[in-house]
Image: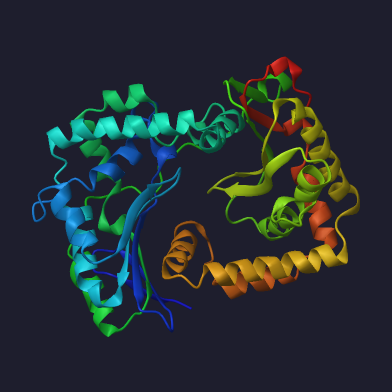
Amino acid sequence: MYEYLELKNKAKVYFIPLLDTKSLTTLVMYPVGSRYEAEKMAGVSHYVEHLMFKGTKKRPNTLNLTREIDRLGAQYNAFTGKEYTGYYIKADAKYSEVSMDILSDMLFNSKFDPKEMEREKGPIIEEIRMYQDNPLMNIDNIFEDVMYAGCSLGRDIAGTEAHVRSYKRPDVIKYRDTYYSPNNMTIVVAGAIDEKVKEQVKKYFGAGKNSGAKKRDFKSACFGPIEKDKRIVVQKKDTDQVQLMLGFPGFDYNDDRNYAEGVMNTILGGSMSSRLFIQIRERRGLAYMVRSGSENFRDTGHVFVRAGLEAKNINKAIAVIKKEIERICEKGVSKKELADAKTHIRGAMTLSLEDSSAQANYYASEALFSKNMEDPEERLEKIEKITNEDIIKVAKQVFKWNQMRVAIIGNVDKKDIKF
């Protein structure tokens, strides 16, 4: 369970006390990401995230800032998604005060020095190139570009090299000030919490002043064209292994059908005993990696299957995937598969949530996106109630072949792909 506190400046705080841990994770999330950006500013949320580590008035440069955290042996980083940006420090709970001092200083007092801003464009461009050179990392970008063609959800979170080079300081500052404000902050503190920690949160995060930040400012999601030749994209690249990703429109974050969809995906491709793993890897030797999953956003989502395989095996793998999907749509799953999927989900969640940072991420996502926050046990109780009929119903709603999008990176020709 959690304890909720709203600070005087309207920042929202969730305390997640954990027994038998000596660590403390402080995570600050803002409900803003790449889908909030105008096209000309694509990637600016990610750019702002980087700049928060470039120095404050109290800690004037990157070395001053990072050395102070590093000496604690702490884990710290930041991340940008399509609907959120987060910053965290995980450290020994005895260092809670300095952790909060540093994190709040970064978020409230970063200088955004003009020279540093220009210099940081280089590392970001290299990060973009790193993803583009690695098909395993880049296939998600290619797939979401074809799935959500025509809207900001389909864009690369980091933008393009041209976008990054074009950023002007006044525009970046304006964007930051539009969204980075205490009344737009969600703070999750998980781990060894006591009254001292609660007072530290008030002291360091309650001091920030509001700037009238916006909470939601994005265009509604859309899916790309439904013409078959526009539902597939192939990025020609000379690689030994081809990356394949296919998927279908799914559900938004708050849709109750996500419970059945999650169980279904566990059976389809969520483990080493899943149907796709057995049929594609073990029985036919077509791929080393194959799995299925889903992404859920505020107003939409998608279900996907991805695999890494030899070019000559792409059509064979797609045929197997279609066959297994059709089996679920027609007959559903067995009692044993259903029971095993539920215990798998419970066990995996239990293991992941032993860590204070995982707890912080779980509750931050719930706080930002859920209409009715659920603790893990409440979610698991709903999963326990899923029936075979629920899975068949959801499968038929999701798996529509005239809506399937396909993305491929490798040395193959689009005309040769059969889907």
Q: Is residue 61 above or below residue 91?
A: above
The percent position of residue 111, horizontal first and vertical second, equals 14, 45
The residue lying toward the viewer, choosing from 146 and 66, is: 66
The percent position of residue 74, horizontal first and vertical second, equals 29, 64
The residue lying toward the viewer, choosing from 80 and 280, is: 280
Residue at the (35%, 24%) spot, across then down = 161
The percent position of residue 384, horizontal first and vertical second, equals 73, 71
Q: Is residue 209 in view?
A: no
Q: Is residue 167 in view?
A: yes
The percent position of residue 402, horizontal first and vertical second, equals 77, 30
Q: How many marks?
A: 0
Q: Is residue 5 left or right of residue 310?
A: left
Q: Is residue 214 above or below residue 400?
A: below
The residue lying toward the viewer, choosing from 343 and 240, is: 240
Q: Quadrant of residue 406?
A: top right
Q: Is residue 10 left or right of residue 216?
A: left
